[in-house]
Amino acid sequence: MFESLYGSSWHHPYFFWASGGPLLALFGWRALTSEAPRTRALAALLAAFQIGILADAWLNAPKLSPLSGGTAEAVAIAFVILGDARFFLLLERFGRGQTRLRASVYALGWSLLVPVGSLLAKSFSSNGRVHYLTYELAFAALVIGLRTQLIPRLPPGPGRTFALRLCGYELTQYLLWATADVCILAGREEGYLLRLVPNALYYVGFVPFAWWATPKELKT
């Protein structure tokens, strides 16, 4: 039952579209109407993220995607990397205060670490769920490393506050995915029900959370 719900189009992409469409409208409107330059810039960035999320939900939908075969797999991998890159871009730009260019370069570098490293899992197992779990645990380990080694070196202030909040959100999301996949690998269908939660965090919750988590000093 839970597996069928998880694989249904009502979950992916309809729920993500119904929830994400209003978010795109909201942040698009803020980007166009806000008088504060920093607010406009952040809202525009989050609106761009939301466009990517809606495209991801469509092109990677289990039943409604127009893609198939190798093209579908390549697009899925690209969206995974982009999904992680949005976290790293916010972390570098607003947490560590990097310029747009440097933040983009660092974000790309960070977002490629786990995908490249997780390729090793394919040499040990052909089970796709094991590959997911390997990726999730590796990414969680990377976030923990950033949370314990890099962020404490930042000076106290809004940047560090934002970075800590963002890492907490990302770590929660990935650990929930990992827990769900452990359940599924153990033969527990409830794992598919649990997986709905981090999916919602990824496709629906990330953009509004990023807006809330950004201290006022970084918006105005």
Image: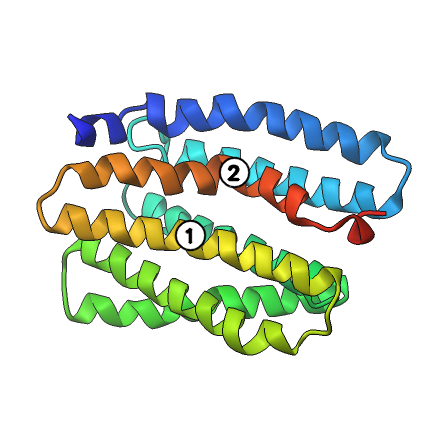
Circle 2 residues within 10 Å: few <14, some 14–19, many ≥20: some
Q: Quadrant of residue 59?
A: top left
Quadrant, the N terminus: top left
Q: Is residue 5 above or below residue 172?
A: above
Point 25% across, 47% down: residue: 180
Circle 1 residues within 10 Å: few <14, some 14–19, many ≥20: some
Element assignment for label 2: helix
Residue type at numbered disc 1? Thr
Q: Is residue 148 left or right of residue 140?
A: right
Identify the residue at the far left of this view.
187
Point 27% across, 55% down: residue: 132
Can residue 7 be seen from the camera position used here? Answer: no
Residue 35 vs residue 188, the one in the foreground: 188
Q: x%, y% of residue 193?
A: 25, 34
Residue picked out by circle 1: 172
Point 42% across, 36% down: residue: 200
Identify the residue at the far front of this view.
156
Q: Quadrant of residue 2?
A: top left
Residue picked out by circle 2: 205
Residue type at numbered disc 2? Gly
Which dot marks residue 58? none
Q: Quadrant of residue 69?
A: top left
Q: x%, y% of residue 68?
A: 30, 38
Mark 2 vs mark 1: give the one in front. Answer: 1
Residue 155 vs residue 90, the one in the foreground: 155
Q: Is residue 172 left or right of residue 165?
A: left
Point 56% across, 65% down: residue: 108
Can residue 119 be seen from the camera position used here? Answer: yes
Q: Is residue 207 left or right of residue 128?
A: right
Q: Is residue 76 above or below residue 149?
A: above
